[in-house]
Amino acid sequence: MGKIRLFCSESLEENKFLSIYEENFHYLVNVMRCDIGSEVLLFNETNGEFKTQVKEINKKNLVLEIIRKIKYQNTANNFNIVFCPPKSHKLDILIQKCTELGVNSFIPVISDHTENRKLNISRLNKIIKESVEQSNQIKIPNIYQPISFDSFIKQNTQDQKSHIFFADIQSEINFFNLKIDYQNSNSIFIGPEGDFSVKELETLRSCKNFFSFSLGNRILRSETAAIASLVLFNNLTS
């Protein structure tokens, strides 16, 4: 059996007993085939990560004993992903892979060419949680309710500490030449499948705290552009 990690919203501390119900109970007993004595790692952003052990298995719940805290250094997530939601399966890939790579938050924006305008935030939060569990992270990124393009621009032009780096196929700026101040709130803005409209691009290019960058001459799908951008920008912090 491989390592089992689960996010736990309850307070975690050594020598505490926790009862696990419903979805996580099903996952541990029926999927992972846990037995008495099986080890499970529980974590949350507040308390950190803890080694636990299965002490009881009942019909509808199991009991875990928290044994000890694990020394864990969580890597800082420096970037938000601002994106125009693609259709369902592409959206799932974007959320899953960007979470695995380490992202601070997801901000969906409805632009002129956005394909998917109604998001199931609860479902996306589940994908985020599972991706964090799988990728050995502790922080659960936030995902916000969709916001209009104009509202997003207005909010962020009023906050000069907010720096937005937007992918633009016409940009001549290589991302390696970008100057990033980590005292700011930094976001990567990925447009929709059909790109930003002409009016939207004019707006983005006119904002002082918005900075264009190029991912090369290839036209990428939005989920590919988001993943590639996050890998490249994370590389600037290493």
Image (spheres, grey):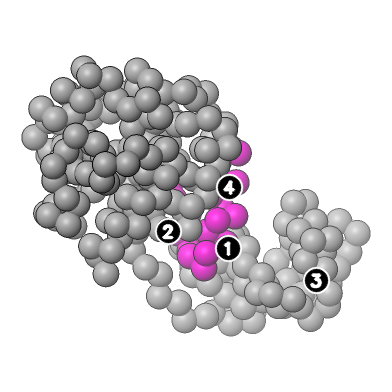
Q: Earlier in the sequence, mark 4 or mark 2?
A: 2
Looking at this view, name the residue that lies furthest to the right.
59
State the SS at label 3.
Answer: loop
Q: Main secondary structure of the magenta part?
A: helix
Q: Residue at x 38, y 45 (%)?
A: 226
Q: From the viewer's perspective, is the residue at label 4 or at label 2 nearer?
A: 2
User: Is-magenta flag for residue 133?
Assistant: yes
Query: Is 139 on the left-hand or right-hand side of 128?
Result: left
User: Disc 2 designates what residue?
Assistant: 101
Percent position of residue 143, x then y: 45, 41
Q: Which of marks 1 and 2 is nearer the N terminus?
A: 2
Give how far apart the Cα atoms at labels 1 and 3 are: 17 Å
Q: Which of marks 3 and 2 is nearer the N terminus?
A: 3
Front one among 236 and 57: 236
Q: Which of marks 1 and 3 is nearer the N terminus?
A: 3
Give how far apart the Cα atoms at labels 1 and 2 are: 11 Å
User: Disc 1 designates what residue?
Assistant: 134
